């Protein structure tokens, strides 16, 4: 699957008018969602995603086989998503562990280079939905917990284009593992900016489908007029590849002094 998207930034003080514009253009109130988002970093040395016997009978097996191909040559940071309700924040009630719940795994490649003053970004993506035991699966395949946040979104759709306003809510203290409970939402630190992303998905990389996706995005941008300032974004902002830092002792040792033949040391 290929993802084509445009990006704009909206200050938190302007979120009300921004939502009103999107509601008017799309003719819908949209969906308000919260997600727990976990980030897992792959091993320094790529080793694929081989341990998938537990999903042999899952409808997602073919998608995991595809994921194995992507991770065989390069390690990436994988994203796990779990929907949450507002009532879950600050709740002390016994809840099912995240690993037992069905979640979504998302992999994204480094976006393709852009030529000239092009606003849209396109990249290969794979989304595996409605899968339980995702945390166990990624950990069994050498991925380590890196970070966690809560994502708040308002989502609208029109003519195959998704309009998504998103911001991240951050935990005030770090954690070495996945949290068992969520604090009250007032205890989370929200980003000052929301990200507006116009997105279209293309099943395969054909010129016809790619041109259609770009045209849909440009038409959607035009319908929004001057309400949002869509920007050129460096593709490296979306780079999820694991960057390996060479170990200090991996450098070759310095050579000894050159000794002429026949000379005594």
Image (cartoon, grey):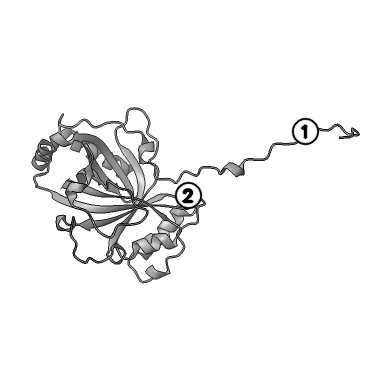
What is the spatial separation of the Cα atoms under label 2 and label 1, in whole angstroms? Answer: 40 Å
Foreground of the two, 64 or 96: 96
Rendered image quadrant of residue 116: top left
Q: Residue at the location (89% across, 34% down)?
A: 264
Quadrant occupied by the C terminus: top right
Establish if 176 lies above or below 12: below
Q: Is residue 254 left or right of residue 174?
A: right
In the image, which disc is placed on residue 257? 1
Residue 74: mark: 2
| Rendered position, 198 above or below 40 | above
Q: Position of residue 201 (x, y in %)?
A: 28, 48
The location of residue 240, given as percent across then percent down, is 39, 45
Q: Position of residue 44 (x, y in %)?
A: 50, 50
Q: Residue at x 46, y 58 (%)?
A: 142
- Foreground disc of the pair 2, 1: 1
Q: Position of residue 14 (x, y in %)?
A: 13, 34
Disc 2 packing (10 Å; few <14; some 14–19; many ≥20)? some
Give the side of residue 149 with respect to residue 34, left or right: right
Farthest residue toward the right? Answer: 262
Does the rendering let one see residue 181?
Answer: yes
Report crowding for label 1: few under 14, some 14 to 19, many 20 or more residues within 10 A (C-alpha).
Answer: few
Does residue 265 appear to the left or right of 243 in the view shown?
Answer: right
Q: Are marks 2 and 1 in contact (CB under 8 Å)?
A: no
Q: Earlier in the sequence, mark 2 or mark 1?
A: 2
Label 2 SS: loop
| Secondary structure type for disc 1 | loop
Q: Is residue 223 above or below residue 200?
A: above
Q: Is residue 127 visible?
A: no
Numbered badge on residue 190:
none
At x 28% / y 60%, what residue is drawn? Answer: 180
């Amino acid at each position: 699957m290929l993802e084509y998207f445009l990006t704009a930034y909206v200050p938190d003080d302007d979120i009300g008018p921004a939502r009103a514009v999107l509601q008017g253009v799309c003719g819908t109130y949209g969906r308000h969602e919260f997600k727990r988002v976990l980030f897992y970093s792959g091993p320094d040395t790529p080793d694929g995603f081989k341990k998938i016997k537990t999903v042999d009978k899952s409808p997602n097996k073919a998608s995991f086989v595809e994921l194995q191909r992507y991770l065989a040559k390069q390690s990436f940071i994988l994203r796990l998503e779990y929907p949450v309700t507002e009532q879950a924040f600050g709740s002390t009630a016994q809840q099912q562990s995240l690993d037992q719940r069905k979640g979504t795994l998302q992999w994204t490649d480094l976006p393709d280079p852009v030529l000239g003053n092009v606003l849209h970004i396109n990249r290969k993506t794979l989304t595996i939905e409605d899968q339980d035991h995702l945390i166990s699966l990624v950990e069994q395949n050498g991925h380590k917990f890196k970070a966690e946040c809560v994502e708040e979104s308002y989502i609208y759709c029109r003519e195959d284009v998704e309009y998504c306003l998103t911001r991240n809510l951050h935990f005030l203290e770090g954690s070495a593992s996945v949290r068992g409970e969520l604090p009250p939402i007032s205890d989370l630190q929200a980003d000052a900016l929301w990200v507006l992303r116009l997105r279209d998905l293309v099943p395969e990389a054909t010129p016809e489908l790619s041109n259609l996706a770009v045209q849909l995005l440009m038409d959607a941008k035009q319908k929004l007029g001057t309400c949002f300032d869509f920007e050129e974004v460096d593709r490296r902002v979306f780079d999820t590849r694991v960057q390996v830092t060479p170990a200090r002792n991996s450098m070759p040792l310095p050579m000894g002094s050159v000794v002429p033949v026949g000379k005594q040391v």
